[in-house]
Each structure stands twice: as structure tokens, then as C-alpha cells.
């Protein structure tokens, strides 16, 4: 019997298999009591994802899945707590849906994906554009929510760190604790740690026009109409411009 198949009925075996595959330190793993509080494996686990489905996801979206996330999905295609999916199945991991306004953000980065929705307050997301060095991977952040007053914030330096702590905390949304200290603003760290999206020359010549349009409050649809370009090209202009506005505006 394969290691993945052997873990299908027991949550502790699934977590142990994931930790060995992803190189997660034993000290990060949850206690038996914490796992018992999460609930039975039959509710938390799903059949493993097809490796071909993970490869297809990476080809379609243009980003590689972190090793720890990929290792988990090959054991269980998702992870469910009593309050909802902490980790979506691969078919449901898609571009993040914004619930909170982010100052200075005109168009959402293509590298932001919704990873799970374990509570009603906000979603859990991952930024695949950069690694949180020196001791992390693709960072995990909470989407925030304007209705509840929660701001977007980075809550872990990697999937491994977030998932292991979620397990130790009995599957609850520990990042909502009053004394929880986040790691920063997702948009600010994205701009600081990842390069600006490249622009082809045919769009670069439009940057001065896009700068004035963005300053006047035009969105991507209005910008596309004003410049006679596609909305896709308008989004590319805004993504580049918002990343380094001072450089592109000539100031």
C-alpha cells in the first residue's frame, strides 16, 4: 500500500506523511489532543489530488505551488475544519476575491490566490510572486474585510508555518486573536519583495497617459476605453504602474 493511501483514514498519519514529505520540523506538529479537537479524519480529509491536476494548475496560472502545499494536496485534496475549508481543493484555488480596500492598489496582483475560507470573516490567501526569505516560502495572508473592519495582513511566512500552526491551534482561526501580531501589509511587502511586472514596448509608451488616468481615478475598464486598448492591456499597465509609480511617472 502506498504511503498516501495508508493515511486516508487517520488524520495523524496524514499529518505525519505531509511533514516527512515537506520537511516540516517535528516541533511544529500538533499534539494528539489538538488533532482530536479538529474532528474525525473523515470530515477533514479528502482523496488525494491527481499530480496531473497540480501540474495543469501551474501551467494555467503561471506559478509554481509551494512544496508544502503541493505535498499536502497529494495526500488530501483540501483540508476542512468545522467552520469551513481551510485549504480548498486544487480546482477551487483561484484568484483572490477582494473584500477590503487596499491603499495604492489599482489592480490586484496576478500572484494572489485564495487558498481557503475557514471562517466567515475573511479568506486566507497566498502570494506566489516571491519567497519570504530567509526562512519562509510564499507568504500566507488574510484578505481582510471592510464590513468587519479587518485589514489585509500577512499571517505566516509560508504555507508550512501557517498550516502547522493551524493544526496546533485545533483548526481555529488563531490570526483573529486580539494579541496576534501579523507580519505586515500584503501589498506593501509584495511591492518591496517582488519585481514590477514587465511591460512590452508597445505598452510602455502609454505609461504617461496611464499615469494621468490613474491619478484621475480611472479604473481598468475606463482606461482601456480612453486609450483604445484591451482591458487586459489596461490591467497590465496599471499593475506595472502601481508597483513603482515614482519611477514610471518620472518623479
Image (tube, grey):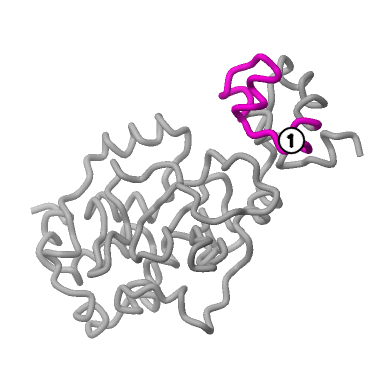
Name the side, left or right, on which 114 lies relative to 250: left
For label 1, the SS is helix
> Measuring 37% from the left and 70% from the top, which residue is drawn there?
164
Q: Which region of the structure is painted magenta?
A: 212-235
Rendered position, 83 above or below 207 = below
Name the side, left or right, on which 119 lies relative to 132: left
Q: How many marks?
A: 1
Rendered position, 74 above or below 147 = above
Is-magenta flag for residue 223? yes
Is-magenta flag for residue 171? no
Query: Quick one: quadrant of the C terminus?
Result: top right
| Position in image of residue 247 (x %, y %) | 84, 38
Quarter of the rendering containing residue 76: bottom left
Q: Which residue is mark 1?
A: 214
Q: Give 60 or 188, whichever is nearer the viewer.
A: 188
| Position in image of residue 150 (x %, y %) | 53, 67
Q: Give 219 or 164, whichever is nearer the viewer.
A: 219
> Measuring 36% from the left and 58% from the top, which residue is drawn there?
22
Rendered position, 90 above or below 21 = above
> Measuring 54% from the left and 56% from the top, which residue is drawn there?
100
| Position in image of residue 71 (x %, y %) | 32, 53
> Measuring 35% from the left and 79% from the top, which residue is drawn there?
169
Rendered position, 187 above or below 226 = below
| Position in image of residue 30 (x %, y %) | 31, 78
Name the side, left or right, on which 220 lies relative to 96: right
Q: Residues within 10 Å of mark 1 (few under 14, many from 20)?
A: some
Q: Main secondary structure of the magenta part?
A: helix
Amino acid at each position: 500500500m502506498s504511503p498516501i493511501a495508508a493515511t486516508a483514514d487517520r488524520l495523524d498519519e496524514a499529518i505525519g506523511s505531509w511533514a516527512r514529505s515537506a520537511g516540516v520540523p517535528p516541533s511544529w506538529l500538533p499534539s494528539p489532543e489538538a488533532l482530536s479537537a479538529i474532528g474525525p479524519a473523515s470530515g477533514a480529509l479528502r482523496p488525494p489530488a491527481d499530480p496531473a491536476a497540480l501540474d495543469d494548475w501551474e501551467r494555467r496560472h503561471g506559478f509554481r505551488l509551494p512544496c508544502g502545499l503541493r505535498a499536502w494536496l497529494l495526500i488530501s485534496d483540501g483540508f476542512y475544519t468545522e467552520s469551513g475549508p481551510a485549504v480548498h481543493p486544487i480546482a477551487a484555488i483561484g484568484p483572490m476575491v477582494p473584500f477590503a480596500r487596499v491603499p495604492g492598489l489599482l489592480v490586484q496582483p496576478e500572484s494572489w490566490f485564495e487558498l481557503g475560507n475557514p471562517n466567515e470573516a475573511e479568506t486566507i490567501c497566498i502570494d506566489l510572486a516571491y519567497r519570504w526569505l530567509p526562512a519562509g516560502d510564499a507568504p500566507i495572508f488574510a484578505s481582510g474585510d471592510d464590513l468587519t473592519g479587518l485589514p489585509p495582513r500577512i499571517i505566516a511566512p509560508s504555507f508550512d508555518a501557517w498550516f502547522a500552526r493551524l493544526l496546533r491551534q485545533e483548526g481555529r482561526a488563531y490570526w483573529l486573536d486580539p494579541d496576534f501580531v501579523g507580519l505586515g501589509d500584503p501589498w506593501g511587502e509584495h511591492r518591496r519583495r517582488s519585481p514590477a511586472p514587465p511591460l512590452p514596448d508597445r505598452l510602455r509608451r502609454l505609461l504617461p497617459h496611464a499615469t494621468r488616468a490613474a491619478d484621475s481615478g480611472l479604473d481598468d475598464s475606463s482606461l482601456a476605453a480612453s486609450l483604445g486598448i484591451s482591458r487586459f492591456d489596461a490591467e497590465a499597465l496599471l499593475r506595472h504602474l502601481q508597483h513603482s509609480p515614482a519611477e514610471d511617472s518620472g518623479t
